[in-house]
Image (cartoon, helix red, strand yellow):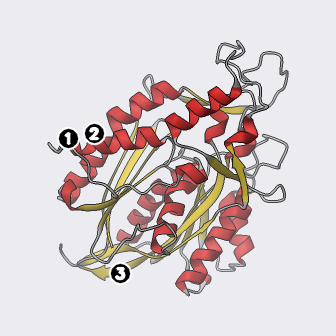
Amino acid sequence: MSTSIKSVIIATGSFIPENIIPNSDFLENRFYEKNGEPIVRDNSEIIQKFQDITEIEERRYANTEHKASDLGYFAALDAINSSGIDPESLDYIIVAHNFGDITAGSTRVDVLPTLGSRIKNKLGIQNPDCVAYDLPFGCPGWLQGMIQADYFIRSGDAKRILVIGTETLSRVTDPHDRDSMIFSDGAGATILEAKITDSEGIISHKTQTHTVSEVNYLFSGGSSNPDFITEEQYIKMDGRKIYEYALKNVPLVIQQSLDKAKIDVRDVKKVLVHQANGKMDEAILKRLFKLNGITEAPTNVMPMTIASLGNSSVATVPTLLDLILKNKLGDHQINKGDIVVFTSVGAGMNINSMVYKF
């Protein structure tokens, strides 16, 4: 690997809300099919099947007084404190999210001013050359922010960049839609720094957007309950189509990023994947190794948090990384020299993958 300017992760941070919402909290919900017909099965059966498929047992919801920019600020502060840097030295703050700041009890999107500006203000950064902006890119938003940051750094435009993923999806879920049990709240952050090195840093990345028939696999819509009259808009999804789409396309995008890096999948120590559905993620990993003629994917290569944290969208991957690097995720570790793949799929429909050497 030649010596050059590379984007190196110098610190991570996360914020996991304290409110634990177990699956049993949904036992009193009344669920409906997408066509508006009530689901006649007992909720205990619906919830058990949901858990069997997604592996989600509980999730985290933000405090009512906190919005997405608050969670993002907490994660950013954690990363800055972990790094020891002067926040005034940041050249960019990139904030990935999908719904902006939503007040508890509402689904109204609030993105003026941007969450990037709000978080910069909360951090007390006075430097006007620290540019703060938002990146709405579905669940792959944080990873796309990392990819954009890499371009800024390698072009010589920036030396330090803070990338944040923050979301309060619990506030845009339809209580009559069983898919609402997937979503959660949280935030993760990473600081990238330009370093002249022949080893560590971002090696390659690949992004795709599919919109021919896939554009509305995730969308905003009304309640599944036809008798629930409201102007509120909720996050909606076609789970079966997303599953099939992800299984078909995500392994191919990961493989392209590995090919660009000239790295064999056998040399990958960890795959940090967006946590949306446990069974889907396991199938993606198996398909990736199958592409390389390997029938059995190695164990312990894909750490999971979905069972306890649910799907916090743009926050899932940076939170996962932070937990591993701070030795808070069981026996999962990342050591110097390890090759790690980051990948995500979500609304758009967007997919991205990044290869990194620690």
| Tag 2 near tag 1, CB within 8 Å | yes
Q: Residue 101 location in percent, x, y?
A: 75, 52
Q: Residue 342 or 269: which is nearer the viewer?
A: 269
Q: Amino acid at mark 3?
A: Lys
Element assignment for label 1 = helix
Distance of mark 1 from mark 3, alpha carbons?
34 Å
Q: Amino acid at mark 1?
A: Leu
Query: Mark 3 or 2 closer to N-term?
Result: 3
Q: Amino acid at mark 2?
A: Arg
Query: Mark 1 or 3 closer to N-term?
Result: 3
Q: Quadrant of the C terminus?
A: bottom left
Q: Is residue 140 above or below residue 2?
A: above
Is residue 195 visible in the rendered image? The answer is yes
Distance of mark 3 from mark 2, alpha carbons?
35 Å
Element assignment for label 3 = strand
Can you identify the residue that label 1 sits on? 291
Can you identify the residue that label 2 sits on? 287
